[in-house]
Image (spheres, grey):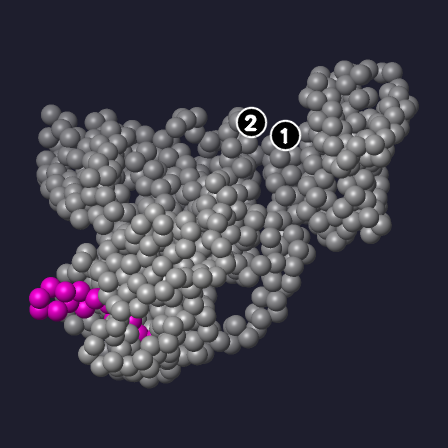
Amino acid sequence: MRGLRHPLRQGVAALLALACAACGLWLAAHHPLSPALALVGVVAAAAAAFWRPTWALAGLLALLPWAGLMPWTGWLVVEEFDLLVLAVAAGGHARIAAGWPAQPTARMRLARAWLLGAPLLAATALAAAIGVADAGGLAWGWWQGYHEPLNSLRLAKPLLAVALLLPLWRGAWRADAAAATWAFQAGMVGMLGATALGVVWERLAFTGLLDFSSDYRATGLFWEMHVGGAALDAVLSASLPFALLAWRSAATPRRWALVALVCALGLYAALVTFSRIVYLGVPLGLGCTLVLLARQQQRQGQAVAPTWVTVAVAAALYLALAWWLFPGSGWRGQVTLLAAVALLLPLATLPSRSRTPWVPAALVFGLLAVMAVAALVLLAPKGAYLAFALAWLATATSLWRGRGGGLGAVVLSWAGFAGVLAALAAVGLHWGEGEGLERSLPVALVLAALAAYARRDPPWPADWRWQGRLLGLCLLVSAVVGVFGAGAYMGDRMTATRQDGEDRRTHWREALGLLRSPAEQFLGKGLGRFTAQRAMSGQTQDQIGDARLRESDDGARWVVLSGGKHMLGWGAVFRLSQRVAVPQGTARLRLRLRTEQAAEIQVDLCEKHLLYNAACLGGQRHLKPAAGLWQTLEWPLKGEAISGGPWYAPRLVVLSIGVGTPGARIEVDDLSLVDPRGEMLANGAFERGLARWFVTSDHNHLPWHAKNVGVHVLFEQGLLGAVAVLVLLLPALWRVTLGAARHHRLAPPLAGAMLGLLAVGMVDSLLDIPRVAFVAWWLLLVAVTLPGHRPAGPAPRRAP
């Protein structure tokens, strides 16, 4: 009889499962790349969600950074994340219809979430309707863009998706609250890992991991940044607090090391955004998380050890050493400093069971180790690096064997550390010669003095977790020193902060100035209408160019390209692009076009991800007017050789065309790009619409975004929408900071994530990026559904 207790709920779940499955399969059947593969993916995801609904939600979060293939498909209104959401919703609701959970172990009510979220759902639906009407009325088209009606529905999707998945979150919680908590945390950590891996690939491919002087800001796998925006910034700010919680609570060394690696990659990704707001938002979010975790520990009667003073002093000392060392030995010096500190922390707390005085023996063997390092430096090519590696490995081995306090291992550990410090100075000498030695030798002496002081009464605990966290903080400090010390790029961005702030405030005033009537101020211009309305503002800088698909009565299709009316430098051209293979030999382009005025067409074949190019072929061609007549042009593309990058980090190659004359219009058709292997383009004649094509605006981003989440909501949803957002946001923040849910394990990272998102939202719209909006709404609704008055316990033992 248990399965008949809620027949209405199960009936609704069954209907939702059928609707989601039908919609997901229909969309997958129209996938531009491979309908068959998309159908298999939807079925597999739905089956996984039916089998393990709790972990399907975690997988949805972890796969979010990778579930967007617009630069390959040409889809803007629909993307792969939508297919994944529909598949998980179909499988999860089918499981609910089958009576899941059969034996609930915890309670969760969604009444609060629906009550607080209903105004936002209503305001979003109204704003979507206004946006569709403003764009000319509802009309279906697979290839609609930012100016067309389906863009309004595109921005309404995230909130609808969250509402669709909330019953699955409730079911997961009722089935096993501990597993639901663990899965949610794991999903957010997985999101961070997936995001960071995308950034690491991008940096390896286009700049190198340690190049902090090039004008290249990472975008990761977020295609939405093809017109600017802060998708990467937002996801990093939202996910890092959960990684911090997972790192602090890891129960085993293996899990601790894995999460530490994810944290390190995530912090690296945050640094290479070169985003000033990320440099503010991430520390705010992590700091908030740490403060709330400490408050939870105090309320449970746990000691908050060691003191913040110890951490602050250690971090300040390391910062001073790293900053002093960097000019003389660069990144090699940072690596040796961090490696030496990694040995110093456990060395000072190494126990010794022997009563025999061992310091004289350690000094003698230490002197021998220094002499061995000197000999290796003099006799071997690049002997400084080899000496450091051997000394470090020998010391680490002795430390591991000396955990029980054996006299021999203790002596060898201290002697080996002396060799490590000598090799640190030698690395400075090898890299920076005289200046390198002048800077590395004092650092080695400071570390030696600190080791001698800490030998009798270590100022830090022997707990490996605490030492590992401090080492992670030191790694972050070294990375920050490298970002600011390796080149002038970040320093120049900091210098421009005041002017950029003035430009943003002017941009906000102009955006809100477009709300001219009381009705527009109360209801907004409609979802997805910012770019289109800015283009009609009458200001030259807002008319940035466009690409529209046209079709004649006989079914022929072509594209109309419009040039922006602002100043068109190379990076300011609005481009229509397609990703292609690396050309082998000479690449030749042929296309048909027509124009009614003299114009320049910009054609480039570049190694390029989204916004920044490496090697390029091509250039500009002058077009003569020929009203109503198609011209055929063909020429070989010449320029820098395109290599495609290394095998482990391949560079993407993109063919782009744009109008280089302000305000000019060019119609293009029948594009063909061939190399000795044959045709390289797909859908060059646009028979399949804009499949495989996408647009980019490399440098001119203000007309695409309100650049402030509050201004964005006011512009698109008016005061009504702003109030609806606050009705959900303020209770969510209250519950996880000062309210009933503050004791829950997830409360600190939820608060930190929301604070980080709000910081990023001060200078970017966020909600005009569907995947980011999904994360934001999901965090808020999870926060308002967390059960209250439950103390935060230890990390759940259940493993994935």
Left or right, residue 707 beside residue 136? right
The dominant secondary structure in magenta is strand
User: What residue is shown at x 50% (from left), y 29% (from top)?
Assistant: 255
Q: Is residue 580 above or below residue 570?
A: above
Residue plotted at (29% across, 47% down): 81
When asked about the image quadrant of residue 54, the answer is top left
The amino acid pointed to by label 2 is Pro
Query: In the image, is residue 557 part of the stretch drawn in magenta?
Result: yes
- Asked if the stretch drawn in magenta spans residue 284, the answer is no
Q: Which mark is in front, 1 or 2?
A: 2
Q: Which residue is mark 2?
A: 253
Q: Position of residue 627 (x, y in %)?
A: 22, 81
* Pointer 1 residue: 464
- Give percent across and percent down for residue 548: 24, 68
Is residue 575 visible to us here? no
Q: Are marks 1 and 2 in contact (CB under 8 Å)?
A: yes
In the rendered image, which quarter contains the N terminus? Answer: top left
Along the horizontal axis of the image, is 744 left or right of 395? left
Residue 462, picture quadrant: top right
Q: Is residue 518 above or below residue 474?
A: below
In this rendered view, identify the residue nearer to me: 463 or 429.
429
Residue located at (8% from left, 66% from top): 554
Q: Secondary structure at mark 2?
A: helix
Q: Earlier in the sequence, mark 1 or mark 2?
A: 2
What is the magenta range?
Answer: 549-564
Q: Position of residue 621 (x, y in %)?
A: 38, 72
Instruction: Assess disc 2: are there few (<14), some (14-19) or many (≥20) residues with their C-alpha within 10 Å of its C-alpha.
Output: few
